[in-house]
Amino acid sequence: MEKIFKRTVMDEVNKFIDSDDIIVFHGARQVGKTCILFYLQDQLKKRGETT
């Protein structure tokens, strides 16, 4: 898998990562929504979280 770069939106997402709030990613095709989720999954796995 290719390297995934941190997006600026992740600073906002990290504020809610430990809460029960639901985060919705929406946008046009091929703008990086899935890459953001893969980055988030990688960060959670590094913390020992189950994804």
Image: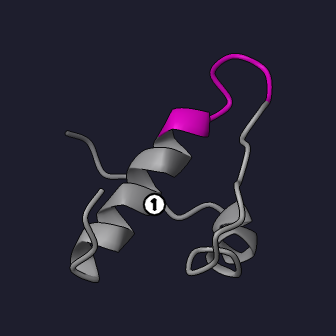
Q: Quadrant of residue 21?
A: bottom right
Q: Is residue 51 above or below residue 43?
A: above
What residue span does the magenta drawing correspond to? 27-34
Front residue of 43/6: it is 43
Dot 1 falls on a residue whose secondary structure is helix
Which residue lies most toward the right here? 27
Q: Residue at x 75, y 72 (%)?
A: 12
Residue 39's place in the image compared with 28, above or below, is below
Q: Is residue 6 left or right of residue 8?
A: left
Question: What secondary structure prevails in the magenta region?
Answer: loop
Q: Position of residue 13 (x, y in %)?
A: 68, 68
Q: Position of residue 50 (x, y in %)?
A: 25, 64
x then y, percent, for residue 22: 70, 55
Q: Does the segment drawn in magenta span residue 50?
A: no
Residue 11 location (% of width, % of height): 69, 76
Q: How many marks?
A: 1
In the image, what residue type sits under mark 1? Leu
Residue under label 1: 40
Classify 18 as above or below 36: below
Q: Is residue 31 magenta?
A: yes
Query: Is 48 on the left-hand or right-hand side of 32?
Result: left
**Within 10 angstroms of label 1, few (less than 14), some, or many (20 or more) residues?**
some
Residue visible at 62% across and 77% down in the picture: 14
Q: Residue at x 30, y 56 (%)?
A: 51
In the picture provided, is 33 more to the left or to the right than 3? right
